[in-house]
Image: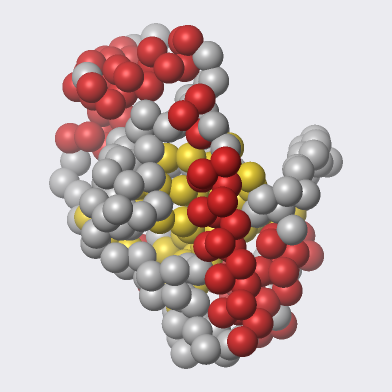
Amino acid sequence: MIFNKLVNKSSFDKNGYVLLNTNLKGNLIFDKLCIEIESLLKKKIKTSNIKNLGGYIVGNLNINQGHFGPKLYSIIFKNKFKKYFQTLTLKKFSLFDIRHGGNLTLPKKGNQMFHIDGGYKSEMYLVSIATENITLDNGPTEVCIGSHIKPKTFDEFFFEKKIKKKLLMKRGQILIRKHNLWHRGTKNLSDKPRLLLSFIITLKNKKNKKNQVSPKFEIMRNSFRNNFIGRLHEIIYVKFKFIIIITKILVSFFKKFL
């Protein structure tokens, strides 16, 4: 894999992400893999009862890459990419654990609230590969540039001035993003689901247990649970988002005085 981006660590540290152009589009192995992924995704959507999954109402679901994970890994994580990643993080690639993941945004759905992934102080990166074009119409990820530089409570983030950017991607491009960059999924205005597969890269820790991941390509729930409470929470999130925003602001505000 070849990408035409010089390492700019200062820009990555300042913005919280970098988008790489590659020569993957037109690569027979990668193109064939993209077709296989799209075909299986369509089949899964038709045959799986995704309406029962937490996240269906919002329109954002998680993906287990299954057998596609190792194939994508072998395409992306070549020596040149590993060296690039090491320059960004100032750490050896061997110090990291890598998990497979992904996100599916359903048609006419998908508007999320801004958030970060996990705790602020943990070191985690997301490497996403576009297996399809991600445009303004099909629910691109929106980030707040520089919002990762220092920790902030929800009320501090909510009321601060933001520089927002929707990250459009062409098939074959790779996005490296810091986990504590505030971001959200935007609404998919198109008639097709939008898929983005990612690798979650975290520092190795003896306390971390190895996740038992299914070898099958699967559509899974997101943070909302598959039960009545989870469904109620999700309905409030979609229909009465202002309630959750006000609650988050009040909780984060009062925590400062506890």
Residue 99 seen in the figure: no
Q: Position of residue 14 (x, y in %)?
A: 37, 64
Say which of 98 and 193 sits in front.
Answer: 193
Q: Percent x, y for residue 46?
A: 51, 44
Whole-percent x, y for residue 123 in the image: 59, 49
Which residue does the image show at 37% across and 22% down from the upper left?
234
How many labels, in total? 0
Q: Is residue 93 above or below residue 156?
A: below
**Would residue 227 be seen by someone viewing this image from the given angle?**
yes
- Which one is nearer the viewer's eye here, 32 or 241? 32
Give the position of the N terminus as an image quadrant.
Answer: bottom right
* For residue 197, side relative to residue 79 (left or right): left
Quadrant of the image occupied by residue 29: bottom right
Of the pair 112 and 150, the residue shown nearer to us? 112
Quadrant for residue 72, please give it. bottom right
At 48% from the left edge and 40% from the top edge, which residue is drawn?
61
Q: Which image quadrant: the C terminus?
A: top left
**Residue at figure coordinates x 61%, y 50% from the top left:** 101
User: What x and y, as percent, mark residue 85?
Assistant: 60, 72
Which residue shows up at 43% across the image and 17% down it?
Answer: 231
- Rendered position, 84 above or below 217: below
